[in-house]
Amino acid sequence: MADKTIQPVKILYSGKAKQVYAAPDKDLVIIHYRDDATAFNGEKRGRIEDKGIINNKLSARFFRLLEEAGVPTHFVSLLNDRQMLCKNVAIIPLEVIVRNVVAGSLAKRTGQAEGVELPEPMVELTYKDDAQGDPLVTEEEAVSMGAASKEEVERIRQMALRVNEVLRPFALERKLRLIDFKLEFGRAGDGKIILADEISPDTCRFWDAETGEKLDKDRFRRDLGNVKEAYIEVWNRIGDYQPAPAV
Ligand code: TMP
């Protein structure tokens, strides 16, 4: 892709898989996607080659799709293979999980088998705090902890379900079953809530619609092998991943 790199002003935040830099325009930030992978609140660490490139471009693809569907996001433009320009937001300290199918912590917590379709999509909130292990919280608890107002929590819930309505059929057309995903939201300068963070195989569970093969970060979390191949497969189906030509 054309290189539109912008010189970062300073680093604002370094996370487990991404860094956020101030851009010369103070309303914007540069988000840099790395290949680092962690699981279980950082206890398990590794690297997935080219993951940063794939997640940057996949997130851009999903954010564009969502904007077209009327969901406001922080995405502005792609700068290069690993960086995107985004609106500067104050992140709301909630992880917003949407589930279509029983998997992961829901299976563990309730004893239901992974793969059972839920009667309707559900939204869960966790409070972003690694030291507490991102605990599950009710909407009332999220409000009482000051994460967001009651109206904001309701708006976030509606936006999360709308994201699912857009992404789920889009994935299925590409033979991917969208099992569940995690979103983060932020407040823009005008106080408006917009979708932030990333949307990628790090933050979504995708299963092959025909075989049920896991094509997401669970391959890393559960040591299933072929981790990079799974990310490439998702990109091949959703974006236009072009492997470097053999020389
Ligand atoms: P869970 O079943 O482990 O609660 O995960 C639900 C979804 O959220 C799944 O698609 C993976 C994603 N997720 C994250 O993006 N970050 C996290 O820290 C966790 C625990 C899950």
Image (tube, grey):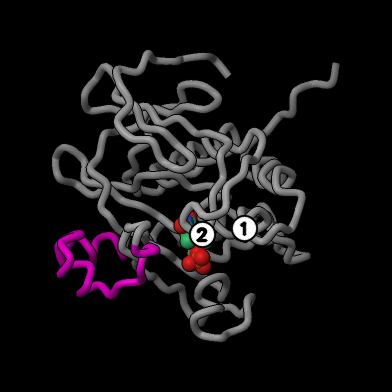
Residue lying at 51% horizontally and 59% vertically, measured from the top left: 40
Q: Say which amino acid is labelled 2.
A: Phe
- State the residue position of label 1: 221
Q: Is residue 82 above or below residue 65?
A: above
Image quadrant where one finds the C terminus: top right
Is residue 52 visible in the rendered image? The answer is yes
Q: From this viewpoint, which residue is outermost toward the bottom? A: 111
Residue type at mark 1: give it: Arg
Residue appearing at x 31%, y 63% in the figure: 127
- Would you place residue 244 above or below residue 14 in this image? above
Neighbourhood count class around disc 1 (C-alpha, 10 Å): few under 14, some 14–19, many 20 upward: some
Residue 9 placement (x, y as % from top left): 30, 17
In the visual, does 134 lie left or right of 109?
A: left
Seen from the viewer's position, the closer of residues 17 and 58 is 17
Observer-nearest of 39 and 161: 39
Image height of 1 relative to 183, above or below: above
Examine the rendered structure and indicate whether residue 26 appears above or below residue 205. Answer: above
Residue at position x 15%, y 45% from top?
191
Dot label at residue 40? 2
* Callout 2: CB less than 8 Å from ligand 1: no
The CA distance from mark 2 to mark 1 is 8 Å
What crowding class fits label 2: few (fewer than 14 Cα within 10 Å), some (14-19), or many (20 or more)?
A: few
Magenta residues?
A: 132-157
136 within the magenta span: yes
Closest to the observer, 168 or 231: 231
Q: Quadrant of residue 208?
A: bottom right
Q: Position of residue 26 (x, y in %)?
A: 21, 24
